[in-house]
């Protein structure tokens, strides 16, 4: 079974036109209440975002998703006027994000999207920033590197030689701080380029 990868793409900066474009895109991907396949299906399949002119049987295959979305499968978990939250298999839907960035760039040349993501274990986590219609920066930390950053997500009694202390906490907050520091640095670099 594939590991779930959770990611949130955020419209970080954009003009009024691209904000409206984003709202329209989210609206297009949201089922009207009376058309939901089930009470828990709020969003349409991700391949309906931009690829409506392709045969449904083809676009819903694993191979098509890997080649065009960037993951074995991908579902929208939540979406609003500023963000799109997804769950995908094995990796982030990077090709989907690239397509969103390309399409938005046609509306606003200075639009910025940010992404934070993590594998459910986590085996990896990271952040990305999209600018100029492409990925401007992607920083990913693999589990082999967690120790360097003093990150622990599970208590191993055999390794530690003792039971988990009551006050021990996994490093989720430190992970989030790292993700946002990487995003802030990349956005700052973009702002510097725009000001030059």
Image (cartoon, rainbow, N blue to C red):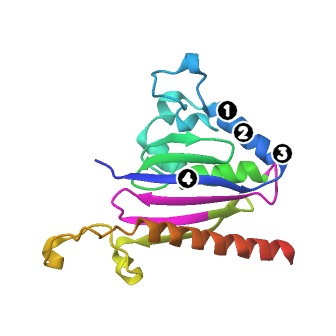
Helix, strand or loop for disc 1 = helix
**Residue on which disc 4 sits:** 8
Helix, strand or loop for disc 4 = strand
Tell me residue 36's x, y (percent): 52, 21
Which label sits on residue 23? 2
- Cα gap from disc 4 to disc 3, whole angstroms: 22 Å
Residue 22 lies, with reference to residue 169, above or below; the image says above
- Cα gap from disc 4 to disc 2, whole angstroms: 16 Å
What residue is shown at x 46% (from left), y 50% (from top)? 71
Contact between marks 4 and 3 (CB within 8 A): the answer is no
Find the magenta span and give its range: 106-128
Q: Quadrant of the C terminus?
A: bottom right
Which sits earlier in the primary sequence, circle 4 or circle 3?
4
- Cα gap from disc 2 to disc 1, whole angstroms: 6 Å
Between 147 and 131, the one lying in front of the other is 147
Tell me residue 59's x, y (percent): 51, 35
Which sits earlier in the primary sequence, circle 4 or circle 1?
4
What residue is shown at x 60% (from left), y 53% (from top)? 9
Left or right of residue 54, residue 13 in this image? right
Which label sits on residue 27? 1
- Cα gap from disc 4 to disc 1, whole angstroms: 17 Å
Mark 4, other Cα within 10 Å: few <14 / some 14–19 / many ≥20:
many
Contact between marks 2 and 1 (CB within 8 A): the answer is yes
- Cα gap from disc 2 to disc 3, whole angstroms: 10 Å
Residue 142 lies, with reference to residue 27, above or below; the image says below
Which sits earlier in the primary sequence, circle 4 or circle 2?
4
Mark 2, other Cα within 10 Å: few <14 / some 14–19 / many ≥20:
some
**Residue on which disc 3 sits:** 17
Residue 131 lies, with reference to residue 30, above or below; the image says below
């Amino acid at each position: 079974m594939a590991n779930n990868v959770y990611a949130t793409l955020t419209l970080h900066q954009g003009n009024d036109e691209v904000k409206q474009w984003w709202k329209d895109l989210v609206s297009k991907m949201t089922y009207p209440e009376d058309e939901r396949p089930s009470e828990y299906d709020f969003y349409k399949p991700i391949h309906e975002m931009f690829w409506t002119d392709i045969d449904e049987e083809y676009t819903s295959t694993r191979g098509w998703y890997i080649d065009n979305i960037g993951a074995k499968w991908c579902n929208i978990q939540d979406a609003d006027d500023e963000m799109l939250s997804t769950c995908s298999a094995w990796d982030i839907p990077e090709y989907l994000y690239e397509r969103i960035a390309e399409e938005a760039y046609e509306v606003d040349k200075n639009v910025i999207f940010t992404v934070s993501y993590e594998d459910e274990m986590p085996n990896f986590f990271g952040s990305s920033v999209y600018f100029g219609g492409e990925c401007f920066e992607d920083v990913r930390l693999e589990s082999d590197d967690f120790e360097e950053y003093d990150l622990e997500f599970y208590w191993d009694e055999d390794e530690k030689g003792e039971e988990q202390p009551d006050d021990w906490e996994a490093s989720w907050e430190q992970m989030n701080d790292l993700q946002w520091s990487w995003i802030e640095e990349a956005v700052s670099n973009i702002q510097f380029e725009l000001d030059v």
